Image (cartoon, helix red, strand yellow):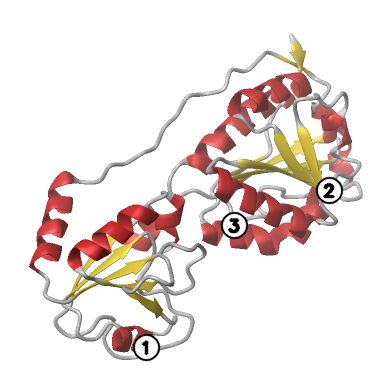
Amino acid sequence: MTTVRDATIELLRQLGMTTVFGNPGSTELPMFRDFPSDFRYVLGLQESVVLAMADGFAQATGRAALVNLHSSAGTGHAMGNVFTAYKNQTPLVVTAGQQARSILPYEPFLFAERATELPRPFVKWAVEPARAEDVPAAIARAFVVAMQPPHGPTFVSIPIDDWDRDCAPFAAPRAGATNPGDPALLAQAAAMLADATRPAIVVGAGVARDAAWNDVIALAERHRARVFVAPMSARCSFPEDHPLFAGFLNAAREQIVAALGGHDVIVALGGPLSLYHVEGHGPHLPDGARTIFICDNPAQAS
């Protein structure tokens, strides 16, 4: 047997999450006792900054980053950037301290009465383990869920006294979630694009997330397709100095239709073509245009 802290540290090491972003308070300090030398702690001025740093780090590395927040107050402080990470489809494992289990019935200062409800609906999965020894398994599941497309943040609430409890070692799971797409549908999409007389491509953040920058350039050049950036795209997915770059679509229905007018095949890659910010009227696509939408988010596809 070992402690929850030791089992969790070894799990994080196996998962490659040895960089921790945080702003610790009293309920998190036991996690960092005897902090290992191969880990690093990135301290932020306050929780919203901490989460933003982790968001950028996760996007740059392509792996879920670990964020440690201070109880309910720190989680609340970070919520604006939890929302941003959720919209960015950024994989994060967010942990937050909780008061000791023995005093939870007395509503202690800073405790989270319904810890898993606080970050919803902007996390993919949230849990406060029923037993201290379930903490490593909860973090492992949070990592797997965060890394499943569409990526996003997950949340684990951990009572302060869990870290020193006995716990069996926990091996990191091996999980994958890559999807090459439906060959028949991809062939149909390729045929539509090949037959197009004036095609357009709309790129979203998924192009950058999947490192498809050069592939999209090659696709656009092969078909002489103008390339637009999807509304509110969180990443740079096409060079803005390229001759085929056509600009940014506004998050308004009429303006999107006007910008794409005259194109007979529109290929939207890695993000929603029809993301709106204001009320609109009329058609969602130019007359006569056919659309191909390829993404990693079933909600967007729906």
| 205 in relation to 28, above or below | below
Query: 228 left or right of 182?
Result: right
Residue 193 % position (x, y): 15, 64
Residue 121 % position (x, y): 57, 58
Q: Secondary structure at mark 1?
A: helix
The residue singled out by tag 1 in the image is 255
The residue singled out by tag 3 in the image is 85
Q: CA distance from mark 3 to mark 1?
A: 27 Å
Q: Secondary structure at mark 2?
A: loop
The residue singled out by tag 2 in the image is 23
Between 19 and 160, the one nearer to me in the picture: 19
| 164 in relation to 95, above or below | above
For badge 2, the amino acid type reads: Asn
| Labels 3 and 2: the sequence-earlier one | 2
Between 276 and 270, the one nearer to me in the picture: 270
* Circles 3 and 1: CB atoms closer than 8 Å: no
Q: Quick check: can you spot residue 201? A: yes
For badge 1, the amino acid type reads: Gln
The residue positioned 66% from the left and 55% from the top of the image is 119
Q: Quadrant of the N terminus?
A: top right
